[in-house]
């Protein structure tokens, strides 16, 4: 078994990691891929010449460069990969539950901020599902999951943006401030719990690092909805809620674009 290490200059998020996996996994002679996002490093355990791998990476235009090649090495065990499944499944369950709860609360309270935040939670659930698929998942399954999640996420984001525009054109009453703040605080607590759960995963791999980044960003989104709720209370206007909802829907739509790009094997930039 050979081990070839590549430095990939432009591998800085899960989109690039998934794109590389989709190109390399399933290739004859490749047994395992190990990613280190922080170091932009890829270790490939394989048989045969590393030039074949380099030829596949070159068209991706990610700045892949071979830095080391070792022969007759032992392939690492799968224990760490298997241990990632439990925390990722818990994170997936938490985010999907929050999606359902926040969507219901947003519709009942009339808050587009909560509705948008619920879709952001759904987007995170898709990210965790993709991360689970990356733990020993097949190329076909990952591409299918990425495509379906991207289309659904993008469609919901566009519907949400259309509703924000409609409410600007035909103003409605201000949303319920209490629901906005209380539900956002619950979501904030759940995101903190998700980060604590993710501490049990093996850090360094791109899809795990992406899960940390997305959940950390969710905390800022929760804070945005809370701020919007306070501004609604201060102004007695729906405008702060609509602005917050529109911004979050744009974030979700951009995430859908990147997921669809990686499902087709492009960079998504």
Image (tube, grey):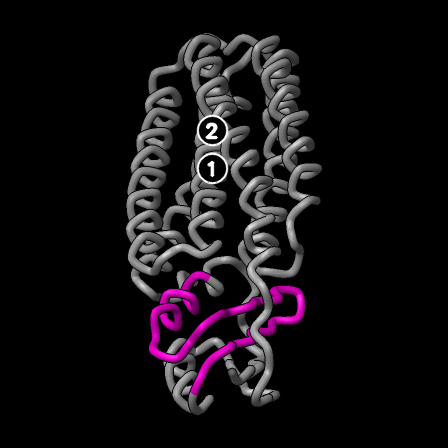
Q: Name the residue under label 1.
A: 125
Q: Residue at x 49, y 17 (%)?
A: 101
Q: Name the residue under label 2.
A: 96
Q: How crowded is mark 2: few (under 14 residues within 10 Å), some or many (20 or more)?
A: many
Q: Which residue is drawn at 34% across and 75% down?
A: 27
Q: Which of 28 and 205 is in front in this view?
A: 28
Residue 113 seen in render: no
Q: Where is residue 165 in the image (x, y as percent from the top left)?
A: 36, 28
Residue 219 seen in render: yes
Please state, as top left, top right, bottom left or bottom right, where the C terminus lies in the image: bottom left
Q: Is residue 155 above or below residue 181?
A: below
Q: Position of residue 14 (x, y in %)?
A: 50, 58
What kind of element bears circle 2?
helix
Q: Residue at x 47, y 29 (%)?
A: 96
What kind of element bears circle 1?
helix
Q: In this view, does 85 lie above or below 53?
A: above
User: Where does the magenta region start and end?
Assistant: 18-47
Is 265 included in the stretch rendered in magenta? Answer: no
């Amino acid at each position: 078994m050979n081990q070839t290490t590549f430095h990939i200059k432009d591998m800085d998020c899960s989109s690039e990691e998934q794109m590389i996996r989709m190109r390399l996994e399933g290739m004859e002679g490749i047994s395992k891929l190990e990613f280190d996002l922080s170091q932009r490093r890829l270790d490939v355990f394989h048989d045969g010449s590393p030039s074949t791998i380099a030829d596949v990476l070159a068209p991706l235009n990610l700045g892949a460069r071979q830095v080391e090649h070792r022969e007759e090495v032992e392939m690492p065990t799968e224990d760490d990969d298997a241990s990632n499944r439990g925390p990722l499944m818990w994170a997936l369950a938490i985010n999907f539950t929050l999606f359902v709860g926040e969507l219901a609360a947003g519709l009942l309270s009339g808050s587009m901020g909560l509705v948008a935040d619920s879709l952001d939670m759904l987007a995170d659930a898709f990210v965790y599902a993709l991360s689970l698929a990356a733990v020993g998942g097949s190329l076909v399954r990952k591409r299918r999951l990425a495509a379906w999640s991207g289309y659904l996420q993008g469609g919901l984001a566009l519907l949400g943006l259309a509703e924000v525009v409609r409410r600007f054109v035909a103003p409605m009453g201000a949303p319920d401030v209490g629901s906005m703040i209380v539900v956002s605080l619950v979501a904030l607590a759940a995101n903190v719990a998700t980060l604590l759960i993710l501490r049990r995963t093996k850090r360094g791999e791109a899809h795990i690092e992406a899960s940390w980044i997305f959940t950390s960003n969710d905390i800022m989104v929760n804070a945005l909805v809370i701020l919007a709720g306070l501004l609604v209370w201060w102004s007695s206007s729906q405008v702060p809620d609509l602005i917050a909802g529109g911004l979050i829907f744009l974030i979700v739509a951009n995430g859908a674009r990147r997921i669809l790009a990686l499902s087709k094997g492009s960079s998504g930039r």
